[in-house]
Image: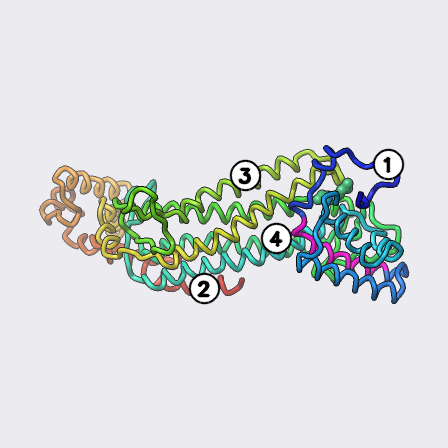
Amino acid sequence: PAAALWGGRFAGGPADALAALSKSTHFDWRLAPYDIAGSKAHAKVLHRAGLLTDDDLTKMLAGLDELLADVLAGSFLPADDDEDVHTALERGLLERLGAELGGRLRAGRSRNDQVATLFKSFLRDHGRIIARLVLDQVTTIADQAEKHLGVAMPGRTHLQHAQPVLLSHHLMAHAWPLVRDLDRLAEWDARVAADSPYGSGALAGSSLGLDPQFVATELGFTNSSANSIDGTAARDFVAEFAFVTAQIGVDLSRQAEEVIIWATKEFGFVRLDDAFSTGSSIMPQKKNPDIAELARGKTGRLIGNLTGLLATLKAQPLAYNRDLQEDKEPVFDSVDTLEVLLPAFTGMIRTLVFNTERLEELAPQGFSLATDIAEWLVRQKVPFRVAHELAGACVQECEKRGIELWDLSDEDLAAISPYLTPEVRTVLSVEGSVASRNGRGGTAGDRVAEQLAELRTRAAEH
Ligand code: ARG
């Protein structure tokens, strides 16, 4: 059998059932390039500590490069009896360099500090890929907002008409959470960068005079772990990454839900592009928002990956336990899920066509200008409690007669209250209502234009 990394004290090889359970190459093989990068850095600290000659180091680095090339070309693969990615790569190195030199690399390191470090490297790379895809989505929303500046729509709370808002304002409300997700990814990365576990060994550190900070710098980290036990046992970096991916899913799914509703016959707010919607195998007329539904559905698995991970981590004693091998598959799945979902989702939003006439027409309906009456009264120095009552009375009168607020005559208004002079009509329009909400963050046109610039500036920081 291929050499296990731990055969010495055992009388025979592992039972087949154990080997089958223990094996992780079918999922951890994707870490191979990161493991080789770690091995190269480790070879250099062994050399600096006088444990490899100049010649040894040259040969070792060349052997590792050759191994990497074969891994990338697919010509070196894990064998059936390789336990994990580390085992397989050591076998590959021994095959290339011989046991005498190849067998020197493992000094002063353990798979425990190895795997913790390279999982961080892997997630840092994919964090950057995901950030780029999220940024595309933010930019796409900003572009749609810019294209529709000035278009009003019904703003909702409880899914009921609430107050008119600008479509651009509503769209950008979906971009800001994603900007915060980008912040989270960047902050996560900085925290992880300062904590390279290499050099922690199995848990207690190394007796061989190896320099963990040198390895950290070689691998693109800013510092090494302050505590070797923590370095090998902590997986909060995985859970936090899984949280951010789940939050991105949740943010997309809220947008998805609106696209699904907006694309219904009843709403008719948007039309999906043919290239980003699907048909039915039986109903010839169907055009379905599958991307949005998959975003909603896949968010369930992103949340599941996070909760599963937290359950795995809960109550594990220090330091490394084999349970920790279970940290990889859920997060690999989260990475793969977002990397396939985000491009499709962004395409769907980019090609969404808005029925602006319908949005504008519905904006003032459902008595969505009632708050404007109340606030107009407040500006006439009427206490808000009273103003709220009077605006409510206007709504009641309209509902009774099946008319809209702006259909009330001067006499109707005066009959409700002498405070309701004909001037109140100035706020009984969507334009007036929208323009009046002109504080920072409000839906007034100028503010929304400012917000768009702010959003683009924040996006450009990433
Ligand atoms: N494959 C393991 C993991 O992913 C690393 C191996 C550590 N094994 C051990 N017996 N300490 O966590």
Left or right, residue 392 beside residue 220: left
Residue that appears at 30% across and 46% down: 286
* Label 1 to label 2: alpha-carbon separation: 62 Å
Is residue 35 in the magenta section?
yes
Query: How far is mark 4 from mark 3, CA to CA?
Result: 20 Å
| Residue bounds of the magenta highlight | 29-46
Secondary structure category for the residue under label 2: helix
Give the mark, 4 or 2, whose residue is nearer the N terminus.
4
Residue type at the position of mark 2: Arg
User: In the rendered structure, are the residues bearing label 4 and label 3 in contact, judged by CB atoms less than 8 Å apart?
Assistant: no
Instruction: Give the crowd class for mark 4: few <14, some 14-19, many >=20 residues within 10 Å.
Output: some
Residue at which label 4 appears: 188
Mark 3: is the Cβ under 8 angstroms from ligand 1? Answer: no
* Inter-mark Cα distance, 3 to 1: 39 Å
Q: Which badge, 3 or 1, comes first in the chain's sequence?
A: 1
x then y, percent, for residue 127: 58, 55
Residue named by callout 1: 10
Marks 3/2: CA–CA distance: 33 Å
**Which of disc 4 and disc 1 is earlier in sequence?**
1
Label of residue 204 in the image: none
Q: Quadrant of the N terminus?
A: top right
Return the x and y of residue 284 as percentages of the image width and height.
28, 46
Counting from the top left corner in percent of width and height, residue 433 is at 26, 54
Identify the image quadrant of residue 280: top left
Q: Does residue 167 appear in the picture of this structure?
A: yes
